[in-house]
């Protein structure tokens, strides 16, 4: 499979995931602004998850742009990532519908953690094909931001047992960390604006 097909497939899956997520927001039967108030937690969880999916799409695009060789291991690692991301609409809806209840917030964090682990595995699989001395390896460096994200997810999951809003704050913090585009790959490949 060419890298172009892998990118197109992944883009299509992420577009479907975002579409499913927005379809989970149910339209109220009444037509006044106060009728939208019960949807605020659902909308808040949607915004957070939309940012996460956007971050994954952006970084995935840059990672694959810098990728020269795609083999079976990369395909399976990519599917592993897409599996965890495909669960985001479910946990987003469950968390929003239940107003950020403890168990919903814990499961949301577990899915975010597993997606981060899957992305880390995908990076490692691609690096194995390209070599530790490749331009991509130099661009990614020690990936402190990725490792810090996984650590913060673990802390957030534990914090959710105390108070779900602490966990949500940490999830938002990680999203904000990644909202600033990761330019490592762009800089190393001469693609920066």
Image (cartoon, helix red, strand yellow):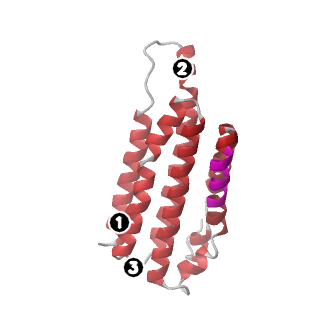
Residue at 48% across / 63% down in the picture?
118
Mark 3 surroundings within 10 Å by alpha-carbon count, few (fewer than 14), some (14 through 19), many (20 or more): some
Q: Earlier in the sequence, mark 3 or mark 1?
A: 1
Q: Tell me the distance, in whole angstroms, between the alpha carbons under discs 3 and 1.
A: 11 Å
As drawn, the label of residue 45 is none
Label 3–label 1 contact, CB within 8 A? no
Q: Which residues are magenta?
A: 150-159
* Lower position in the chain sequence, tag 2 or tag 1: 1
Label 1: which secondary element: helix
Disc 2 to disc 1, how far (Cα)? 39 Å
Q: Which residue is mark 3?
A: 69
Residue 162: % across, % down: 70, 40
Indicate the quadrant where residue 34 lies: top right
Furthest toward the left, the residue is 1
Q: Would you say 189 lies left or right of 23 here?
A: right
Work out which quarter of the rendered image holds the C terminus and state it: bottom right
- Residue 190, percent from left and from top: 57, 75
Secondary structure under badge 2?
A: helix
Cα separation between marks 3 and 2? 49 Å
* Predominant SS along the magenta part: helix
Q: Residue at x 56, y 79 (%)?
A: 137
Left or right: residue 143 versus residue 3 is: right
Does the segment drawn in magenta span residue 5? no
Which residue is drawn at the image coordinates 35% and 60% (left, top)? Answer: 8
Q: Where is residue 41? Give x, y as percent.
A: 57, 30
> Which residue is tagged 1?
6
125 left or right, relative to 98: left
Q: Are marks 3 and 2 in contact (CB under 8 Å)?
A: no
* Left or right, residue 32 beside residue 2: right
Q: Could you tell me residue 37's position as x and y percent?
A: 57, 20
Task: Name the element at disc 3.
Answer: loop
Q: Which residue is denoted by mark 2 in the rendering?
A: 36
């Amino acid at each position: 499979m060419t890298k172009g097909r892998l990118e197109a497939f992944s883009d299509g899956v992420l577009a479907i995931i975002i579409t499913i997520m927005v379809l989970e927001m149910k339209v109220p039967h009444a037509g006044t602004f106060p009728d939208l108030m019960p949807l605020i937690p659902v909308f808040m969880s949607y915004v957070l998850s939309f940012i996460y999916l956007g971050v994954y799409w952006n970084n995935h695009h840059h990672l694959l742009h810098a990728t020269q060789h795609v083999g079976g291991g990369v395909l399976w690692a990519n599917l592993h990532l897409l599996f965890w991301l495909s669960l985001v609409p479910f946990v987003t809806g469950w968390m929003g519908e239940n107003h950020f209840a403890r168990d919903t917030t814990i499961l949301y964090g577990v899915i975010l953690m597993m997606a981060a682990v899957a992305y880390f595995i995908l990076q490692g699989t691609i690096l194995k094909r390209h070599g530790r001395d490749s331009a991509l390896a130099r661009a990614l460096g020690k990936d402190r931001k990725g490792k810090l994200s996984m650590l913060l997810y673990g802390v957030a999951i534990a914090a959710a047992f105390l108070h779900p809003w602490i966990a949500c704050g940490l999830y938002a913090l990680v999203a904000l960390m990644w909202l600033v585009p990761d330019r490592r790959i762009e800089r190393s490949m001469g693609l920066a604006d």
